[in-house]
Amino acid sequence: MKAVKPIREIRINPTLPSESVLVATERGLRPRKEQERVPHDSREHVDACPFCRGNEDKTPPTLLALPDEKDWQVRVVRNLYPVLGTDNQQSDYSFGLQQALEGYGHHEVIIDDSRHGIEVHEMPERHLAMVLQTYQRRMDALYSADERIKYVLVFKNFGRAAGASISHTHSQLIAMPVIPENIYNEVEHSRSYYRKHQQCIFCSLIDEALTFETTIYSPESGEVRRKIDIGQYVVERGERFIAIKPFASRYDWEVHILPIAHQSNFLEASVEDMSDLAKVLRRTMARLNKVLGGAQYNYYFHTAPRCEMFADCDPSYHWHLEICPRTSIPSGFELGSGLFVTTISPEDAAARLREANLMSKERTRQDESQDHLEKIIKRMQKIQRSIKASGQPASMLELMELKDLGREYARIIEHIANSQGGSELA
Ligand SMILES: [Zn+2]
Ligand SMILES: [Zn+2]
Ligand SMILES: [Zn+2]
């Protein structure tokens, strides 16, 4: 990779001008503390984990299970510790400047996979598409069932640094009666941009990202003034989705995924869209994982809210998924000023993500399961050989071990079969 000269500049986020970012790439300028890495948990099943298959009684009842309740691969339950609820604790805590709203809403947990330690980049794309469709189904169900809901936020915390309290992979969904400020500002700003330019700002950003090179000429002399390599922000591209490293983003490795064709609402995405998004998301996560050596991150969907005042935002707003890897802890400067510092330039970060080689020996969960199967078979054969050689009937201990191995074998075969077929929604 070519050497990059240090940058120190404040960049204004084009989609949210109230938010700016300080890009300061010189090594001496490191106000933030690095997050500790967490080793990859590759266990398939953990007895004490409430999200593992077989432990369904440790969570509230199932709201949705796919492909079916018995052999579920994705399961949705109410959150045991909801941040918003419907239990109608009428808030009368309003006095002078101290105003409060009732904490009304719904909070659900989506268990993304029945396997314990699996990460997004290890999931088969069909499975990931099923997870995405589950998000959609629950969002839709909550909007239809509850008139008061104005926004449903789907998000995921992965890793302790990202605030995940349970390590088993899961997402969450919070349906609320107000539009969160970040979304409000984004929708509002894109609408005013549209009024001015008759164009969706996100579509314009995608167009720019897909223009691979542009040259600016001097109007007087016609000489080349500057050559800009705009394709430098593209991290990953599918047929229908694109992953972009934003020009100004709060986190060093923040990446956004957007539908290439204009679409304002995540609920409008088709089954084909979901399978392309699954592909782009999986590959983006694999890149982050490779470059960061294990990513702890938050991701969340920003989509058009359900609200009278934004009824006209269809042509101006463009839904997207924001992925924020947590590699450092924000400092007092950042919290106090609201000015986030990134110590790698977005152009450099995008280049490193693009360069991450996914082809070279990228081991999937499937490969690991195959290895595991082979080990079990070898162990069984060894026990059988030793029984034969001894000329004695098998001992109780040997029988017990064979039985355990047989069980483990059946479980892995089932997982392989499940992830290979029949996992798509109708
Ligand atoms: Zn688990
Ligand atoms: Zn658009
Ligand atoms: Zn956004």
Image (cartoon, grey):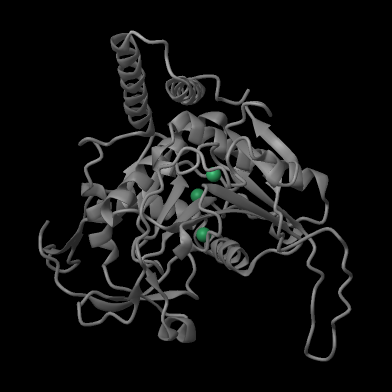
Which of the image's four quarters has the N terminus? Answer: bottom left
Which of the image's four quarters has the C terminus? Answer: top right
- Dividing the picture into quarters, in which one does residue 3 lie? bottom left
Residue at 37% from the left image edge and 37% from the top image edge: 238
Say if 176 sits above or below 395 in the image. Answer: below
- Dividing the picture into quarters, in which one does residue 179 lie? bottom right
Residue 278 image offset from top left, x and y in percent? 46, 37
Task: Between residue 23 and residue 193, name the one nearer to us.
Answer: 23
Residue extending furthest toward the bottom: 96
Q: Is residue 98 left or right of residue 212?
A: right
Residue at 55% from the left image edge and 36% from the top image edge: 114
Residue at 62% from the left image edge and 69% from the top image edge: 181
User: Total of numbered circles in the picture?
Assistant: 0
| Residue 417 appears in the figure | yes
Q: Is residue 425 left or right of residue 250?
A: right
Residue at 39% from the left image edge and 44% from the top image edge: 242
Residue 254 image offset from top left, x and y in percent? 39, 60
Q: Is residue 91 left or right of residue 319?
A: right
Residue 57 image offset from top left, x and y in percent? 71, 41
Residue 20 image offset from top left, x and y in percent? 42, 75
Task: Between residue 213 and residue 374, name the one nearer to us.
Answer: 374
- Dividing the picture into quarters, in which one does residue 255 lie? bottom left
Task: Between residue 330 and residue 394, name the one nearer to us.
Answer: 394
Q: Is residue 3 left or right of residue 370?
A: left
| Residue 232 appears in the figure | no
